Each structure stands twice: as structure tokens, then as C-alpha cells.
Amino acid sequence: MDLFTPIVPSEKQHPNFISTCIPGRASERAVVQNWATDFPDRDGKFVQEFQTTFNSSFWEIYLYALFKEYGFEMNWANPSPDFLLKTSFGDIVVEAVTANAAAGATPEWEKIRLMTDEVINKNFWPLNREAIIRLSNALLGKVRKYATHYQRLAHVAGRPYIIAVAPFEQPDFQHQYDRPMRALLYDDYVDETAYFRDPDAYPNGPPSVQIRSIEKDNGATIEMGIFCNHEWAEVSAVMFSCVATWGKTVAMSTEPRLGSVMTSWGTDESGRSEMRMARIGQPSESISDGFQVFHNPYARRPVPLEIFRRKGVVQHYFLRHHGWVRENYDDCLQFRLTQTLGLINQSPKQHRQK
């Protein structure tokens, strides 16, 4: 399956797809083509969708490559949901979705500045609030799909159902790490804004607070902690990554080029981080770095922790008599920004990828 030879008119091509076709990105395209090896085009439209919608198709290819890396066998006998995985601990069903920008909001590809004023000033609440709203909408759509359709399918019934969601809802989405998702699923919000406003008041790092609910711009209320009761028991877990972006292909590419990969990595169980720099062309992360699994403690069909246990993969789960565990929090990719110079057909300014 040739993803990058254009088959749709240029005016219909997604801005992110156009960006990937720059001649200087050949090594990065090779990474994605390798990910997509033997990926089945079940409806004969995948390449067209990749070139016109991009983000959702890229997320599916990433998940496919990730599951291959895990060694899972994938059953393609049925058109939906997206993945039926055969693992050593039983079969699981995974449905992929992306969180996208609200109607009329600035899409992530129209980013003009490196960072918004809020992010520069380390006021992450506006970004996290928007992420919570858009992630909630994405998850709710797949919960409804399960209730109205998927649960009646023979290959789905009785198996754990996981929603895999990637955030593309705003220009600075790569800064959110696990903050919005922890709040939405567990009502556990890491208040970095409070910490950076007065770090001396929080010697152990940003405080975790309950926010109960947030109000959307239209006045509707979104309740936090949707994994804190039995209402979402049919959802076994949520998979998530805010760094499964084109920037990962830059970080994994092997062709040396003028530029750098700047990342933030967790260094202890509190989530304290350190910054690292790498040169482009010297692979600095694996495909699974930045991948997270949020387990539902009230799931009707829990997902065994062993299935996704892997170096650098963070799993969030609750243990009776112990409390919440964030496995691998002390060695995980939190954030990435790549800066490249000299790409053909680009302006002389630095070209940045998330």
C-alpha cells in the first residue's frame, strides 16, 4: 500500500499530508511505510482517507505497528471494530478514534507560533480544559457505538472492549501528557498551573485535585471520573498517546539531518521530568514510548496488565489495599518537539513537528 504517492487532487489533500510529502522527509515517510507493511485496506479507501483526513488514518497505522511490535495476531475477518487482537491472555477488541477540534476552532495544523501565551506562561488549564471536552466527546461516541451496534457482534461479545484515542483537538495538544485523561477518567487532575504559580507551596510537585465537573461553552456539564463507577463498565480501558504524531517518525528516522529532537521524560514516581536532546538521524525513542493504558477498575471484562506491560509504557490502574498505580511513570516519554532545518521546499525558518 503506497501511502504517499498522491491519488487525490492537491486541493483535497490534508495540510498534514502535504507537509509529509516534502522531499526532505523521505526517511520519515519510510518509517510510516514500514509501519504500514501488510496493513489491510478493508474497504479500498484507506489511501484516499490518509491523504484527505490524515490524523485518524495515521493513528490507525500507528496502532497497527504498535500491536505488531507487541507480537499480537490481528484478525481482519470482520469490518469493525478496528482491531481484534489475539494475545497470550485472550482476545481483545480495540476501536480507534481521534479527538478533533470543535467547529470553528483553530485546527492543530494551523499553528502559527511555537507555543501559545498560556503554555509559555505555564498556565495549562485552558489547554487541558479543551482537551477534556474534546476527549469526552470522542469517547462518548464510541461508547454509544458499542451500545447500539458492537456489543451484538459475535466477535465482540464477551471480550474486553478498549477505546484507543489520540488528541488532535488544538494546536498545543502535545503538552497535555496524561492531565486531561486522568481528570476525565478518574477525577484526578494534576494542577500544574497552581504549582508553577507558587512552587514553594508544593515541595512534592504539582498537587492532584478533584474538579468534579467542567462546564462547556454552551452551558452543558461534563462530569469527571467516568471510570469511578459502573456506568462505563463495558469499556475495559482507554489507550492514549499525545506523542504518536509525525514527530515520532522524526525521532525514529535514521537519516542524519540538521535539527534536533527535544523530549521530556519522567524520572520518578511523582512524574518529575527531565529534558533530553537528540540529533535527528540517531533514533531516540521506540514506537511504544509515550503509549499509555488507562484501566477501568469497574470494567465488566478487565484487561490483564500483562498484555501491555512494556518498558516505557505507562499503565494506570487501581490495586485494592494499595491504591492507584502509574506503572513506568519513572521512565516514560511525556512530551516531544522536533526542530528541523533545510527541508526542501520549505521556508528558511525552522520547521517544527510535535
Image (tube, grey):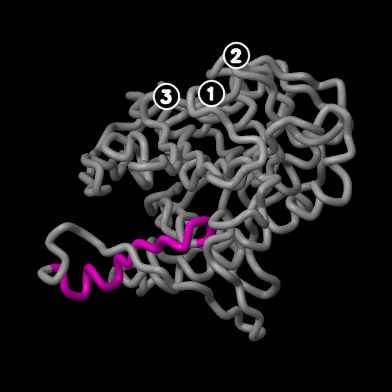
Where residue 113 is drawn, which disc sits there? none
- Label 1: which secondary element: helix
Where residue 310 is drawn, which disc sits there? 3
Q: Which residue is mark 1?
A: 307
Residue at 37% over, 51% down: 350
Magenta span includes 331: no
Magenta span includes 186: yes
Q: Nearer the viewer, residue 294 or 252?
A: 294
Marks 1 and 3, how far apart at CA: 9 Å
- In the image, what residue type sits under mark 2? Ser
Marks 2 and 3, how far apart at CA: 15 Å
Magenta part of the chain: 184-199
Residue at 36% over, 36% down: 327
297 up-or-down from 212: above or below: above
> Which corner quadrant of the image does residue 102 belong to?
bottom right
- Label 3: which secondary element: loop
User: Is label 1 in contact with label 3 (beta carbons under 8 Å)?
Assistant: no
- In the image, what residue type sits under mark 1? Ile
Q: Which residue is mark 2?
A: 88
102 up-or-down from 50: above or below: below
- In the image, what residue type sits under mark 3? Arg
